Image (cartoon, helix red, strand yellow):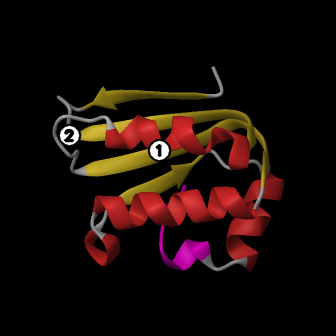
Amino acid sequence: MPISAHTENNGRRLRILVEGRFDFSQLHLFRNAYEQMEEKPDDYVVDLKASNYIDSSALGMLLALRDHAGGDTASIKISNCPPDILKILMITKLNELFTIE
């Protein structure tokens, strides 16, 4: 499955794992991963260790997650970025809106 999600820390953290291409074809799966939660977690982790591609629609999906999670007060980490994806996040200055590990 290209997008999977599970809670950690007694439901206080939602970890979303993105595999393969993170693009428009993943929109509904990505959105469902966080919108289907009964209770909103305190923080989110988007794990890209199994991703090999990201496009502009995925950047928009990350911004939509940020809005959903509380905007400027949201706690969202993007973790395990492959070098090419990290470069895109830095060029687009998303490192200023998300914690990148």
Q: Nearer the viewer, residue 25 or 72?
A: 25
**Up-down: is 26 above or below 61?**
above
Task: Judge from the rendering whether residue 45 lies leftward or rightward of residue 49; answer left or right.
Answer: left
Q: Which residues are magenta?
A: 94-101
Mark 2 belongs to which amino acid? Answer: Arg
Q: Residues within 10 Å of mark 1 (few under 14, many from 20)?
A: some
Residue positioned 54% across, 35% down in the render? 29
Q: Is residue 28 magenta?
A: no
Say the numbered circle drawn on residue 69: none
What SS does tag 2 mark? loop
Task: Judge from the rendering whether residue 28 lies leftward or rightward of residue 34; answer left or right.
Answer: right
Instruction: Classify the position of the N terminus by image quarter.
Output: top right
Mark 1 belongs to which amino acid? Answer: Arg
What SS does tag 1 mark? helix
Percent of width and height locating residue 40: 20, 46
Residue positioned 55% across, 33% down in the render? 17
Considering only order in the chain, which callout, 1 or 2, is on the residue closer to the N terminus?
2
Residue positioned 57% across, 73% down in the render? 95
Percent of width and height locating residue 15: 42, 36
